[in-house]
Image (tube, grey):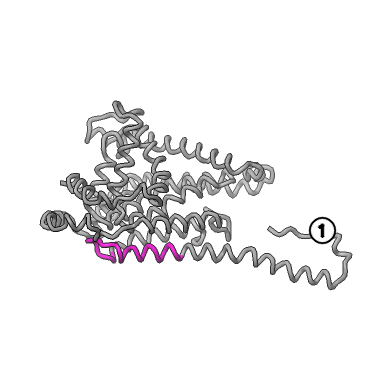
Amino acid sequence: MIHRSSLSHLSTSTVHSSTSTVTKPIKQSQHVVPNVVLNRAVFLINTVVLVGATFLSPSAVAPALQLVPVVGLMVYVGLISGHIPSPLYDRGDRWPREYAIFQLMLLVLTATRLTRSGDESVEDSEDNEDSEDSEDDEDYDYDIEELATFTSWLGSDLNKLFFKGNLDLFTENFTEEMIYFGTAVTLSYAVTKIEWLHKLDASKHLPMPLVFLRNFGLHVAITVAYIWNDMSDPEQSQYKFCRQEYSVVPGFVAPDYSMSRLTHEFAAGWKVFHLSDLWLVRLSHAILYPSILLLYTRRPLTMFFVWVFFIEIDFFHALADASHYVSGPDLAEARLDFQGGVQSACYLNVQVVQTLMAYPLNFLYLATRYGDTAEVVSSVRELSTNCTS
């Protein structure tokens, strides 16, 4: 921000005064324009990369259907970047320059780890599995209705919502989330009207590391509350699922399931369902998962709550589900089975750890060799086939 000179400068000559007034806008434009260009460039690069991945990454799903999650992803990016006006930012604000740079770097690093599905490891097994693959393909319709079946939003898959008219659960959950979001937005605007409260909320003197830790702690607490509410409420689908599928009452800690085993299986499962030749899956995750950093770096406390309740509306996971389906229904189905296991679905500690662990794990595996799957892709494909058979 450019600070204006004091009023004592009014005693200087007219020429000097007029010169300073001319040069100040020039300095301001030199400061602002590069940020605007960078933000727009990153937004456009995200669009081009996702569309390119749709057409270059082989999939049995038609490209037109693959564009459905791509359109959703670009709306999401438009919202979190500020290019689509929303309560997430003050008028005219955009995502920070540092975030745009980080987003671009992660996208580039993710792209460098992608492989082609025609690698040797895949070709060796293709001839032996052609007949099995053709039989598996017959199990899927590859249409918009099936895409909706594989995409969950606020406790209900979109097939029930849009094709079967089962609106009760979704309407209840959506209304609840919008009340929370609307309350947070109203509070953020109300605080600006009271000067001392606005200064307190702004937290300008709080170092960013403490802001990050504060927001992280609050996010963990809110995540635990949301998950436990879904598990413990007999009217919620997750409680009913545990009772009907496993005859288990949801609990706090999974028995005989150590933390080391939990993290090992979750990390191994990531490689199964995020193969390096699934371009759209990996590139979409390189765009979705960094957005948690925008939540953790919100300095005003009221804006943190606006962001956290926006995240709880759950566009994020619906888009991730859709990206997995259009990249391969067989692996998408195996992924849903993995997430629906008794430990993952019915115990609080497992779900909380998996939810929070997903962010750093995606950063690490998308951008480094630790997430490479080219050497084991054939065995992973075989494992996914066994999961769905």
Q: Nearer the viewer, residue 129 or 387?
A: 129
Decide if residue 315 is in sight here.
no
Q: Is residue 334 left or right of residue 212?
A: left
- Name the residue: 41% across, 53% down: 288
List the single residue furthest toward the top. 255
- Name the residue: 23% across, 55% down: 146
Relative to 29, residue 283 above or below: above
**Is residue 21 on the magenta stretch?**
no
Q: Where is residue 155, by image quadrant?
A: top left
Magenta residue span: 44-64
In the rendered picture of this protein, how many numbered marks are placed on residues? 1
Q: Where is residue 212, by image quadrant?
A: top right
Relative to 203, residue 56 above or below: below
Magenta span: predominant SS is helix
Relative to 218, residue 58 above or below: below
Q: Could you tell me residue 86's position as x and y percent? A: 51, 57
Q: Residues within 10 Å of mark 1 (few under 14, many from 20)?
A: few
Relative to 18, residue 238 above or below: above
Q: Nearer the viewer, residue 76 or 33?
A: 33
Q: Could you tell me residue 264's position as x and y percent? A: 32, 37
Q: Amino acid at mark 1?
A: Ser
Q: Is residue 258 left or right of residue 127?
A: right
Tell me the element at label 1: loop
Decide if residue 264 is in sight here.
yes
Question: Where is mark 1, residue-wise?
Answer: 6
- Name the residue: 55% across, 55% down: 98
Q: Nearer the viewer, residue 159 or 367?
A: 367
Q: Could you tell me residue 154's position as x and y percent? A: 35, 46
Q: Is residue 62 left or right of residue 75?
A: left
Q: Could you tell me residue 331's position as x and y percent? A: 24, 50
- Name the residue: 41% across, 61% down: 74
